[in-house]
Amino acid sequence: MGDCIFVPAGTVHALGAGLVVAEIQQSSDTTYRIFDWNRVGPDGKPRALHLAEALEAIDFAAGPIAPSVPVPAEQPSCERLVACSKFVLQRWRIDSAAVLGGSGGFHLLVVVQGEVRVEGDPAGTSLRFGETLLLPASLGAVQVTAVKPSVVLDVFLPQIGP
């Protein structure tokens, strides 16, 4: 499995061709393009650049970014990749089954390797590579069973209060 790189807001970043990326971000619909690789929009015209806005938003004091070092979580087969004020990102390596969710808030599951079956709603749901599932808080904990060895990202909000 590849690297996890936490890129805080205000950090200039780019992605190269051929990458598969799960980009987890806070709820924001703002992107400032400094360069756009000469791509065009649906209208066939070059997409807009936002140089002035980007220069205002860049955190020049942030320094270099390095891959996150996974921290073992309380549950077996689980590593915490990011814990910030906006979200928590965990990586589960599931060979048989694991219980996810149930923390009082929603969870977003993203399959980045393999295939799983999620039990907990009336019908059950199968997820393959690249597919996501939002577990509402009202659903509580669910069992995630590997159809084949799998890696699942689990994204949720940090706990507020005691």
Image (cartoon, rainbow, N blue to C red):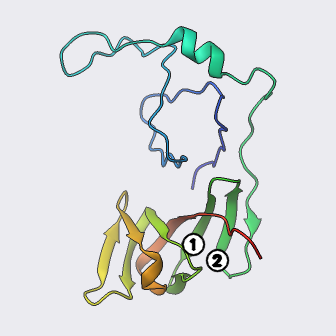
User: Could you tell me if the residues under marks 1 and 2 are in contact, i.e. CB atoms within 8 Å?
Assistant: yes
Q: Residue at x 60, y 65 (%)?
A: 91
> Sequence-wise, which precedes: disc 1 or disc 2?
2
Of residues 19 and 127, the one nearer the viewer is 127
Query: CA–CA distance between discs 1 and 2?
Result: 5 Å
Among the 4 quarters of the image, the one containing residue 145: bottom left
Among the 4 quarters of the image, the one containing residue 48: top left
Amino acid at circle 2:
Ser
Among the 4 quarters of the image, the one containing residue 136: bottom left
Residue of label 1: 93
User: Is 152 drawn above or below residue 62 in the view shown?
Assistant: below
Residue of label 2: 77
Q: Residue at x 78, y 29 (%)?
A: 64
Is residue 96 rendered to the left or right of residue 74? left
Q: Report x, y in % for residue 42.
A: 20, 22
Q: Report x, y in % for residue 95.
A: 52, 80
Q: Secondary structure at mark 2?
A: loop
Q: Report x, y in % for residue 111.
A: 43, 64
Q: Report x, y in % for residue 76.
A: 68, 82
Neighbours of disc 2 within 10 Å: few (<14), some (14-19), many (20+): some
The quadrant of the image that shows the N terminus is bottom right
Report if residue 13 is visible in the image: yes
Report if residue 144 is visible in the image: no
Q: Secondary structure at mark 1?
A: strand
